[in-house]
Image (cartoon, helix red, strand yellow):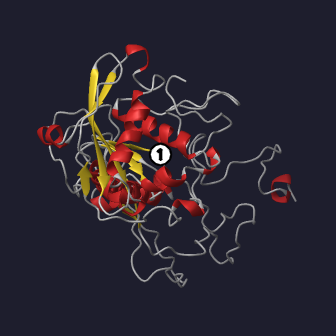
Amino acid sequence: MSPADAFPGRGPNGRTRPAPDAGPPGRPARAEEPVRGLPRVPPPAARRAEPQQPPRFADTNPVVTRSESPSRAEHPRVRRVVATDRTPGRVPAEPRTGGTRVVVTGRTRSGATGGGGGRFRRFVTRWGWRAYAIPLLALATVVTLVDLASGGAGTSGSATAAPTPSAEAPRTAEAVAEPSATPTAPAEIDAAPAEAPETAVGAPGFVQQGAGSVTVVPGTSQVQGTGPLQRFVVEVEDGIEVDGPSFAAAVEETLGDPRSWGNGGRMSFQRVGQEEAAAGDYAFKVTLISPGNMERYCPGVGTGGYTSCRYGDRAVINLARWATAVPDYEGDIPTYRHYVVNHEVGHALGNGHQECPGPGRPAPVMQQQTLGLEGCAKNAWPYP
């Protein structure tokens, strides 16, 4: 046996012979044809190509992808349907939904997908819970503002009806008159205490409620003091069992005292009668009213039937205080009568309230001594 027979793939000199169907170097070799009469033997496993594995789950739902167009402004919505082919011999997986799944990914340059619903969904996605909280808060704010506006209008209306303090009071030409139901002038009062003493209402010595009408005390006094003249009228409520001339004399005595408002020639006082009252020739009135009618002559200012007040051109003296004074005066009724006349006439002359200057010091006559001395000593005079 020759070497060529022992090694079929080599020549006599031992070199490898080219395959019969091999082409020139650099070209792919042609497939070997099996020798007729011999069985076909498969190539070694290393030379066999791996079979292409089909997808485990065939996706029957086409997906729409964004177009790769260079200009999205010209084609805002370009859809391309990509679907996997079914592999022969395999049963496709059941679709997850009953219909074709469509995913829209195309957007316009402005980022809108079109339609009001898309804008709302983007708004909710971006802001989360705030997308609901912001409109609710805005609605609550509007409702609150409307409520405040309507409530403020009602409050301002009621506040307008109530009188406010003023330095000057208008005159009235009526000698005997009922108090007006509608306030016609500002008012100043000492606020009623939370709990009035038992002697304030219904105590012996005074009438709880008179007739409601008033009468000007007749007669005229001499001018007392020097300085600008202040004429005044004295009125007493009907049915309170108080002598008018006696009350008028007490008022004259107080205002004519050198410690009163005319001190040092600051002003002078004169009481005038019914004719001057009818003509309006006066600066203010001093009127004595029963506790039960105080609210008629000081409407809306809250005397509580306990305190006195200045309402319009009237210095209204509460009969209960005139008869019994207050606890801090410890029964010194004459001194309290000087105080209450000077205090309310002081309001009519344009003076406001003052505070206690310090413990043990005389209380200013414009301090609300009816409500308490606040550590001061009682004092009935502007210039003690």
Which of these two is toward me, 111 or 131?
131
The number of callouts visible is 1
Placement of 206 over or under 384, stated as above or below: below
In the displayed structure, 189 sits above or below 383; it is below
Taking the spot 71% from the left edge, 61% from the top edge, the residue there is: 47
Residue occupied by mark 1 = 190
Quadrant in which the C terminus appears = top right
Q: Position of residue 247 (x, y in %)?
A: 38, 46
User: At 54% from the left edge and 81% from the top edge, which residue is drawn?
Assistant: 93
Query: What is the x, y in percent for residue 286?
Result: 33, 42
Coordinates of residue 20 in the picture (x, y in percent): 63, 54
Q: Position of residue 80 (x, y in %)?
A: 35, 59
Picture quadrant of residue 241: bottom left
Foreground residue among 43 and 168: 168
Q: Secondary structure at mark 1?
A: loop
374 above or below 53? above
Which of the pair 52/224 is nearer the observer?
A: 224
Quadrant for the N terminus in the image: bottom right
